[in-house]
Image (cartoon, rainbow, N blue to C red):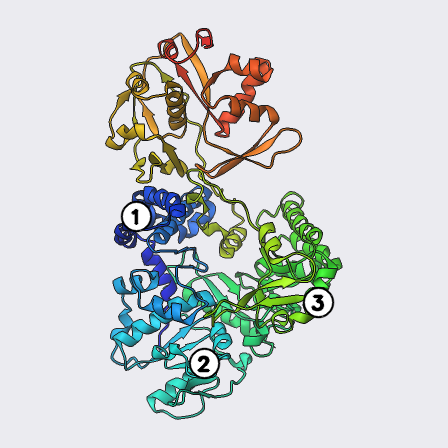
Amino acid sequence: MSSLDLSIEQTDWLLSSEGLTALLPKAEQRLGEVPAGERQAHEETLAVFSDTIARIDSARTTLKSRSVLTDPAAFTDAATVVRNGLSCVSASFPGLNFDLRGNFSCFSHRRSDSILDATRSPDRNVYGWALAHQPIRELEDSDLAVVGISVSADTQLIAALTVARHVKHARPDVHVVMGGNLTTRMVGRWQEEHPFFQYVDSFVSYEGEDALPALCDRISGVDDRPVPGLLERDGRGGLLRTPAAMVDVSDLPTPDFDGLPLDRYFAPGPVLPLQASRSCAWDCAFCSIPFASNKFRIRRPEHVVHDMAALAAKHGTDTFMFVDEIMTLTSLRGVSRELIDGGHELFWYGETRFSKGLDDELATALRRSGCRRLDLGLESYNQRVLDLMRKGTKVADIEPSLDALLSNKVPVHLFCMTGFPGETEEEAVRTQEFATEALRRSVEEYDVPYSTAANGPFILDVLSPVGERPDLFGVELIPPDEGEDLAFDLDYTVARGLTQEDAASLTSGGPSSSAGSAFHRATWIGDAEEWSFLWAMAEAELPARKIATPVAPRPELHPGTLVRLADEVHVRMSATGRGTLLHVPSGDTLLAVPRQWHWLLDGQSCTVADLLESLPSVRTAAATLARLVAHRALAVEAADTFKERSLLWYAAHPHEVADSRLDGSCLLASPETNKQVRVSAAGRLAWLLTADGATASELSTRTRLPEERLMPLLDELTGHGVLASAFFHPGLLDTFLPTGAAQRSG
């Protein structure tokens, strides 16, 4: 028996120079097919494709190295390349959002017919396309008799059925069985033979540790004992079901990861998964976990720690993640005690809930045992809402638990939920504000910079208590669209409180249409919980989400100064009328300039005088020139300093204004660089006044700021990338500035 993780194997190949090179023609071909509203994002991705191909293999190697934990700049650079790679994969298939989480596509995982259509459409299905290029080598083994596919979420169904079809076409003699949490939820609905049986021979509900060996023995002829939870066809269009049986988790062997490509995951480690318990001891109103997990059971802590030690020795790792639905206080205390008493130097994280027993004594033991992160289901910081949720936690226990953990240097992650039926906007905002304040205190009061939080809208699961008895929660279910036979979450209306639309609005940001906006919204791998845990384990400096680029030297431009495209800058002429796109890898910047700058495509050098004379608006050209130099998109040939010169300031980006305040300050967000900076009212005015260039004297007059106050402000805005500046020879200024407007400086 061997194990495969086709998810990471396909992802690792797709995000390689070989895989992306194979995808590039598909992405180019799709430019003429994408809807008009998606062409901007598509062109931005095409502009970064070649640089991503060149750097992706090195980036993957960096992310898998333990040394990256203490090299934040290297992480940011590598993660940026991987983010761009995800965009490249997404751009190669219609409707695909390849984000390492759901990977949504043009096919619907809510419809059986759409899933089956995906399995037959390798040109539109990333999984089918990858299998055509990278077939499963293990299918060549003549002794192979059974292939098991585990499906834990509905977004994995398209990949799972695509693999099943691939297996059946390559080896029709092999028995394909499917199991997992989602499988249990799915097959429980079926009353007759389902179309998925054309690629899957049988399904197993609930747990598989006893079922899979029994099925293998039956197929190989060893014996014909019942297979717990088995669902198969009866040959007459109906179904045969064998009752499920609950696994004795105390008798489970050490997990076996042989065969898995542990060196291919996108993080140093490996961070191996373990369980200290199974299912959940609670019955929260929003959750369906107990439905597909049997009853709650707990493992003996000495067995858990024995597994950790054995796996550490076998695989050379010291990092573990507990994948329990919830680690109870009993598990936390027991595992911590065993790790401490055994002198193990291992690190781990898991998920628990707020309670009175999560106190300083336990938090001290957690830290000593190697716990470097605890995920906590905050959900709401309102007792009324927690009671509606049947959460079983008390608001009074939340802050003491947080203080105990943070004072012992155990970082936390807070899960928040907005829009549970009956919740008001004031209550939702209170939770958001509490989470924000908790993260601030983690950093400023406890010196724990690794804590995080996530806030999402309430999702109505049809198998949760709310889904099964919506009337008890003031909810009316909206039936799924026709044909959505696999819809496990439904839209709904509420009798009171936040609507479904309100919840979505409170947990999402607004769109942007400027250059780079779509390009910079792709998945940031540093948001994965494993990375927060690893940085906390290493007590490392947290990396920035954006590449840090020093302010470019202020250029001195005279008529004969030569400018050319900087090395490693990639240029693409837009096919949709957006001019010329420039990707500057050193700053992860995507710039859009007018089509008249087409000479950049040829890599030519050009004098500043010839450039300005060739463009219709000299003022606009000068502003664009200063902006490109500030972003290091252009190289300027060194020239002798000239004594008489004029310093002009320009807006460096087409910033968008957000979060304006009564004092006139605002947040300036640059889609081109994905950076934000808060500026004062004076800074905002200076930015507005420099759209087409302005001298310090002009700015002083129009802002009414004396130069001794203005110049530090301009330097600060330049340091933040809001403004760019350049020295111009007087001979150039005479062509586009009114007489006397320029400020001469020696």
Mark 3: amino acid? Gly
The image quadrant that residue 334 belongs to is bottom right
Mark 3 vs 1: CB contact within 8 A: no
* Residue at mark 1: 32
Q: CA distance from mark 3 to mark 2?
A: 32 Å
Residue at (30% x, 52% y) in the render? 20
Residue 583 vs residue 306: left or right?
A: left
For the residues carrying marks 1 and 2, which lies nearer the camera in this image? Answer: 1
- The crowd level at tag 1 (other Cα within 10 Å; few <14, some 14-19, many 20+) is few
Secondary-structure class at tag 1: loop
The image quadrant that residue 322 belongs to is bottom right
Image disc number at residue 392: 3
Mark 1: amino acid? Gly
Foreground of the two, 56 or 659? 659
Query: Can residue 411 be seen in this snapshot?
Result: no
Residue at (38% x, 76% y) in the render? 196
- The crowd level at tag 3 (other Cα within 10 Å; few <14, some 14-19, many 20+) is some
* Residue at mark 2: 204
